């Protein structure tokens, strides 16, 4: 029996934002970034929300923000802990205004702290493993950003070097019970030495980003090796079509902000 990751699984709250028509202009290093199909992205987002609901989440759905092509990736805008929330300072100019729109919503649920320059941190670089917060040192998150997280958190914050890819959570996910799903070629695996590891190979690296909700793991469709490993750990797996978000460098965790313990 796995430990409960959301104490009240049936009433956990997830905040999401539909992709706007400008989503096709999202930041991306992906070879197919110019092939993003908005209508398909919209349908895939609907499928993602359905999967969250099926896994027991309550959804708070925000309207698209067409001035911000990347605003569907709400995870990056904040770090929500049990007692309080940090509103991030995003490094990319085109994303910085997103936080004005999210802080009002989060402020209804948590006391807020705002990051100050020169700190930058994307929520995609923060992995909560229960007792420890791991924070990616990436192209988006700097040491001052990690210090800001330390000031907010009651848990120890451990930096992890991101070697390849956008964020820490592009390459590692926590499934509870000291188990991480991890691509050891994309981050420094040393900080996770005391964890049980389910390793992801380069050809399925996109699926290293997955989301546990209660006894369910939500992951991208089309990655049979990772899917098999997660099922072998005893989880129910829900796969979602993510092709359009993958073309914009985003994975399943990026599309929601989860309020732990609600
Ligand atoms: C960006 O480059 O900021 C977006 N296109 C992708 C953000 C993905 N977010 C995440 O991994 N948490």
Image (spheres, helix red, strand yellow):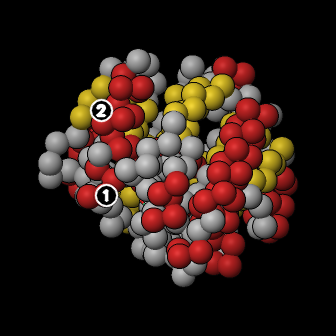
Q: Which residue lies furthest to the bottom in this view?
A: 31
**Residue depicted at 29% across the width and 45% down the height:** 97
Which numbered marker is on residue 27? Answer: none
Q: Is residue 134 above or below residue 181?
A: above
Does ligand 1 reach within 8 Å of label 1's beta carbon?
A: no
Spatial distance from mark 2 to mark 1, Cα to Cα? 26 Å
Residue 166 position within the rendered picture, expressed as x and y whole percent measured from the top left = 44, 66
Q: Nearer the viewer, mark 2 or mark 1?
A: 1
Which numbered marker is on residue 94? Answer: 1
**Residue depicted at 20% across the width and 50% down the height:** 119
Per the image, the residue denoted by label 2 is: 152
Q: Judge by depth and name the residue closer to the eye, 20 or 142.
A: 20
Residue 19 position within the rendered picture, expressed as x and y whole percent measured from the top left = 55, 50
Tell me the element at label 1: helix
Q: Is residue 110 above or below residue 50?
A: above
Instruction: Please give the count of numbered marks on the rendered protein.
Output: 2
Marked residue nearer the N-terminal end (2 or 1): 1
Q: How crowded is mark 1: few (under 14 residues within 10 Å), some or many (20 or more)?
A: some
Q: Which residue lies furthest to the left in this view?
A: 117
**Residue depicted at 40% across the width and 38% down the height:** 79
The image quarter containing residue 7 is top right
**Residue 123 in view (yes/no):** no
**Residue depicted at 50% across the width and 42% down the height:** 64
User: Is 117 on the left-hand or right-hand side of 100?
Assistant: left
The image quarter containing residue 111 is top left
Residue 60 position within the rendered picture, expressed as x and y whole percent measured from the top left = 57, 28
Check the picture and name the quadrant holding the C terminus. Answer: top right
Residue 154 position within the rendered picture, expressed as x and y whole percent measured from the top left = 35, 29
């Amino acid at each position: 029996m796995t430990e409960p990751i959301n104490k009240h699984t049936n009433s956990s709250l997830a905040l999401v934002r539909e992709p706007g028509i400008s989503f096709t202009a999202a930041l991306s290093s992906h070879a197919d970034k110019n092939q993003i199909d908005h209508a398909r992205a919209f349908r895939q987002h609907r499928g993602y929300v359905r999967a969250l609901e099926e896994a027991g989440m309550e959804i708070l759905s925000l309207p698209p923000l067409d001035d911000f092509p990347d605003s569907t990736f709400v995870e990056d805008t904040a770090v929500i802990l049990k007692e309080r929330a940090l509103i991030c300072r995003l490094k990319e100019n085109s994303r910085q205004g997103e936080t004005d729109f999210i802080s009002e919503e989060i402020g209804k649920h948590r006391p807020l702290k705002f990051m100050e320059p020169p700190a930058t941190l994307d929520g995609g670089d923060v992995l909560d493993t229960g007792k420890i917060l791991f924070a990616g040192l990436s192209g988006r998150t700097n040491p001052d950003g990690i210090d800001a997280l330390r000031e907010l958190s009651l848990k120890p914050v451990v930096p992890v070097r991101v070697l390849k890819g956008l964020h820490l959570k592009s390459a590692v996910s926590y499934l509870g019970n000291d188990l991480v799903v991890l691509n050891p070629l994309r981050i420094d695996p040393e900080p996770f030495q005391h964890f049980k590891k389910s390793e992801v190979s380069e050809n399925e690296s996109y699926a290293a980003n997955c989301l546990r909700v209660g006894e369910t793991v939500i992951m991208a469709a089309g990655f049979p090796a990772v899917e098999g490993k997660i099922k072998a750990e005893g989880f129910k797996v829900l796969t979602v079509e993510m092709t359009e978000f993958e073309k914009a460098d985003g994975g399943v965790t990026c599309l929601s902000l989860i309020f732990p313990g609600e």
